[in-house]
Image (tube, rainbow, N blue to C red):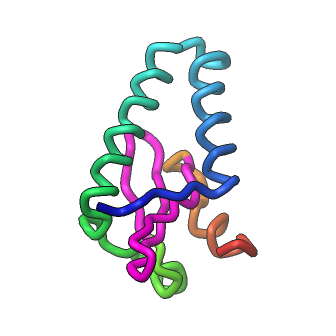
Amino acid sequence: MFNLTFSEKINSDIVSTLKYISEVLEAPRTAENHYEELIKTYDKLQENPFRRPLVQNKYLATKGIRSINIKNYVLFYKINENYNTVFLYRFLYCRRDWINILSNDPDN
């Protein structure tokens, strides 16, 4: 079983996403559903983070970034086999220019 670690950015991404859905879109139940899907995804990643391939972008793939879709969002993560850890990196809306966002991130 793999351990999960969370970047500061993903924590911010998740909080702002759930707040946006709940308060701006006025859909608190939908926000709860997204949160529940996140928890299920965490469990799946702990069991087998290799279930998802590397992203198709060659540059990001060389950085070891993988993704998994959660409703209209994408969870990006990296695997560190030496430490048996999955590093949860970002949680972005699927229509954002995530290739540019991730490629230009100095923490990547």
Q: Nearer the viewer, residue 31 or 40?
A: 40
Q: Nearer the viewer, residue 100 or 10?
A: 10
Q: Residue at x 49, y 49 (%)?
A: 94
Q: Is residue 79 magenta?
A: yes
Q: Tell how many labels.
A: 0
Magenta highlight: main SS? strand
x and y, in percent, of residue 35 in the image: 45, 31
Q: Against 21, is 105 above or below?
A: below
Q: Quadrant of residue 106?
A: bottom right
x and y, in percent, of residue 32 in the image: 45, 21
Q: Against 96, is 30 above or below?
A: above
Q: Quadrant of residue 50?
A: bottom left
x and y, in percent, of residue 4 in the image: 46, 57
Q: Is residue 90 magenta?
A: yes
Q: Is residue 37 left or right of residue 15?
A: left
Q: Residue at x 60, y 34 (%)?
A: 17
Which region of the structure is painted magenta? 66-92
Query: Can you name the residue that lies furthest to the right here?
Result: 106
Q: Residue at x 64, y 26 (%)?
A: 20
